[in-house]
Image (spheres, grey):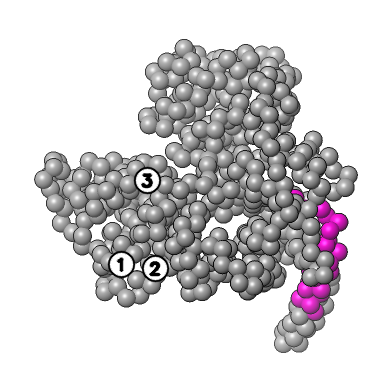
Amino acid sequence: MNPSSRLFPLTFPAIAVALLCLAPGSVFAQGEPMSDRVIELPPLLVEEAAKPLPWRYVEFRGIEMLSVVSDSETRAFLRRYHNQSEILQWILPLRFQGRSSVPDEYILFNENLSRAHSQEVMTTMMASQREAARRKQARDKVESGDRESGRERARGGAKIKFLPNLRLMDVDTTAVFVVVRDSDNLAADFTFSMDRIANLLASRVPVLPSWFMAGMMGLYERANFGDDHIAFRPAVWTTPAELAALKDNTEPLRTLLPMAELFARRPRQGPSDARSDRLWRAQCALFLRWAIAEDKGSRREELWQFVDRLANEPATEALFQSYFNVGYADMRDILSDYLPGAVEQPVTLRVAKVPKSPAIKLRDATPLDVARIRGDWERLQISFVRKAFPDVVDKYVEQARKTLRKPYDQGERDPRLLGLLGLLDCDSGDRASATPFLEAAVKAQVVRPRLYYELSINRYESAAQSAANGVLTRDQIDAISAPILAAWDLQPPNPAACAVVADVWNRTKEEAPADILARLNRAAALFPQVEGLVLRVARLNLRRGDLDQAKKQLLQALSRTSDPKLKKSIETELARISSLRPSADSITVPR
């Protein structure tokens, strides 16, 4: 168990759209015949030593790219990327998009290069596994006497399908692999995927309102970007049947949610509430369509300012009316009247002329470029494969290690490479081997927030083994906290890292210094949905005697958690506060 999860469980919000293309359970359905399985895996790039791929490298608009397609195709892709990024800001301004201090990584790959060799490696590996499975099933058959069952299980084998395009994420960066075929018009076909938009929304700090994120996903799903416009296809409604009813009846009975509920509600996971959740999501998208796309986008600025205000205060009817000049009841009537036309008619939003793309300067990739970007991509594949088909994960670990170790074994000591070797060891479960690499990367101030977090976790685990009765010394606390504090201002902020700092100060008899507590209070305000962080910080405020701050944070956590045990723990802390004197100015809470 990580030290950061010992005091309170940390919970993180679910991304609205799955970021991985394959759910782990979909490969291994109970009772599914082996011969019917289709296992989708990330591409396994295996190069023959005698024929290295002709990689090209470019930095452009916050991304690093390796490409083996032609320079003209690479430039066309990046110009399209630039145009898409600029036009996206008309419906999702930059200030509402998550940011990272680490460039995204892109790989443009031609499927004809090295494909046969890679497929051959995987086919050989799968054949070996099938033979091992056949021998095991034969042994099981003899031991159990179940001859027929043994023969049935031994038939056939899983079919491997390599995913041509895939986006994988780490806590501080995103990696994208794009397979280009000779017949592709790369520039014309490229568009941002739904999972990219979901990531931009979910990673934004402060956290965006749930209704805004859900509505933006629904709006973007109906959008097509041109060179100077955004064309929105007709809106969809909750179900095909209800959509058909809207179109068939000019005066249907339409029951929309009250606007107060629309703004206050959060997505629900339980199937028992599926219908109302569909209505909520559809109405969120309808409201954004009305506010952003209709009347030539004349209400966009009011919407942006309204969302800005919600970072610091709750949505109220008075606040809403100050921007849109209507109350909640009238707004619901407006949306009800707007709905029949929205599901019938497309709408086009004209945008200003897109700024010209910056210069795109490609060069031959160095061995270090290839090792860093390709090796990081291969490292991110490990988690995907571990969930999708764990039987072959060792091959992906081996490939990532081979790519990253090649320049290292030749004497390369670039701190960014060392950091990736450390992350690979962390992801492989070998934290002891990771520590020297992480120490070197952090000492060199590599811009990669996760490096600092992982080093702190390693130091925490080491300190916990020697802590007397779980109590840490000030020297241990400082050593654990130092990497996280050094990377505090890097993007994106990591609530788990903030929770580590709060946790170590909860494991000492000393009060947290005022400057540390001030940082943690700001972090708790930025991540109200992370109960584990909020509760840790509340305890520090309680210890310091700031009862008002502690109570506010505990009530905040209580309103968001559905865990019965966690609720009981929070209620116990609130009862403790109630038993103390109401004025916190001179109170020192007993430890």
Residue 431 shows in this picture? no
Question: Of the residues tagged 3 and 1, which is closer to the observer?
Answer: 1
Residue in front for this viewpoint, 341 or 193: 193
- Alpha carbons under labels 3 and 2: distance apart: 22 Å
From the top left corner, tell me how far across and down residue 63 is, in percent. 63, 46
Q: Looking at the image, how many numbered discs can be counted on the residues?
A: 3
When the figure is inspected, residue 213 is found, relative to residue 180, above or below; the finding is above
> Which residue lies under the disc numbered 2?
459
CB of mark 3 within 8 Å of CB of mark 1? no
From the top left corner, tell me how far across and down residue 260 is, in percent. 45, 25
- Alpha carbons under labels 2 and 1: distance apart: 8 Å
Q: Which mark is residue 253?
A: none
CB of mark 3 within 8 Å of CB of mark 2? no
Neighbourhood count class around disc 1 (C-alpha, 10 Å): few under 14, some 14–19, many 20 upward: some
Q: Which mark is residue 476?
A: 1
Q: Is residue 349 left or right of residue 126?
A: left
Q: Residue furthest right?
A: 183
When the figure is inspected, residue 269 is found, relative to residue 93, above or below; the finding is below
The amino acid type of the residue labelled 1 equals Gln
- Alpha carbons under labels 3 and 1: distance apart: 22 Å
CB of mark 2 within 8 Å of CB of mark 1? yes
Dot 2: element: helix
Q: Is residue 358 left or right of residue 510?
A: right
Dot 3: element: helix
Residue in front for this viewpoint, 171 or 443: 443
Dominant secondary structure of the magenta stretch?
helix
Quarter location, residue 405: bottom right
**Of label 3 and label 1, which has the lower sequence position?**
1
Q: Residue at x 62, y 13 (%)?
A: 295
> Which residue lies under the disc numbered 3?
523
- Image: magenta residue range: 106-131
